[in-house]
Image (cartoon, helix red, strand yellow):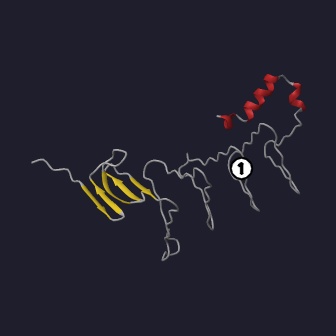
Amino acid sequence: MPEQPKEYYEKKPGFIVKSGVEDLAGKIIDYAVFTDNGQGFEYTTDGQYMQQCRKTSYEACGFDGKDGEPAKIIRAKKGDIIIEAMDGDIILRGKNIRIVALDGTGEVTVVSGKHFAVNAPVQSFKGSNSNTVMSNSVSTGAQATDTTGNMQNSQNSGAEECEGSILSRLLNIAKKFQKFLE
């Protein structure tokens, strides 16, 4: 005898419980509870979880945590983690905030269409190479400025480059920033 589909649907005053039936997207619900106001959660048989609330979703945790023990972990074994605020800001607030790209091929990229600001009493940058390419200008100002180069430390006013052809200027730019432009 073939196994009968397991369907459960129970409407109570103020909420509904469902299992084994289709949701609005056509997925089979594994387990779901929703209020009459459309707030609740749903697990589907294909492994997805969806939660919906009308205003602030607030979770408090870590009240009895120990030093060095995380209060919250979000881990994706495969796939991306996306945090979106479609009409608001994303604010990360903590005693310390660290962004770490794992693996030797990891990267951290910040993209902004308007402004990127770093405001701290001490700013340290460490790496093998540093490239700065601006389409308009670069300004550096300080009470004291030191530059050091073990092999070469050169500056020019741009007048020397103007003496050459446009092609030679473009080739010089391409050589300097070839790695950056790749």
Q: Nearer the viewer, residue 8 or 58?
A: 8
Q: Quadrant of residue 179?
A: top right
Q: Which residue is drawn at 39% across and 58% down?
A: 41
Q: Could you tell me residue 127's position as x and y percent?
A: 68, 50
Q: Residue at x 89, y 30 (%)?
A: 160
Q: Is residue 94 left or right of residue 162?
A: left
Q: Could you tell me residue 142's position as x and y percent?
A: 86, 55
Q: Quadrant of residue 171?
A: top right
Q: Which residue is drawn at 56% across and 47% down?
A: 106
> Could you tell me which quadrant the C terminus lies in?
top right
From the viewer's perspective, is residue 71 above or below residue 117? Answer: below
Q: Is residue 80 left or right of residue 114?
A: left
Category of crowding for the residue at label 1, using alpha-carbon neighbours closer than 10 angstroms: few (below 14), some (14–19), many (at least 20): few
- Extreme residue toward the front, this view: 13
Q: Is residue 175 left or right of residue 62?
A: right
Q: How many marks?
A: 1
From the viewer's perspective, is residue 120 above or below residue 179? Answer: below
Q: Is residue 128 left or right of residue 138?
A: left
Q: Which of 103 and 149 is in front in this view?
A: 103
- Extreme residue toward the left, this view: 1
Q: Which residue is drawn at 58% across and 55% down?
A: 100
Q: In which quarter of the image is residue 118?
A: bottom right
Q: Which amino acid, by three-letter code, is at mark 1?
A: Phe
Label 1: which secondary element? loop
Report which residue position mark 1 lands on: 116
- Extreme residue toward the bottom, this view: 64
Q: Could you tell me residue 51's position as x and y percent?
A: 43, 57
From the viewer's perspective, is residue 44 above or below residue 61? Answer: above
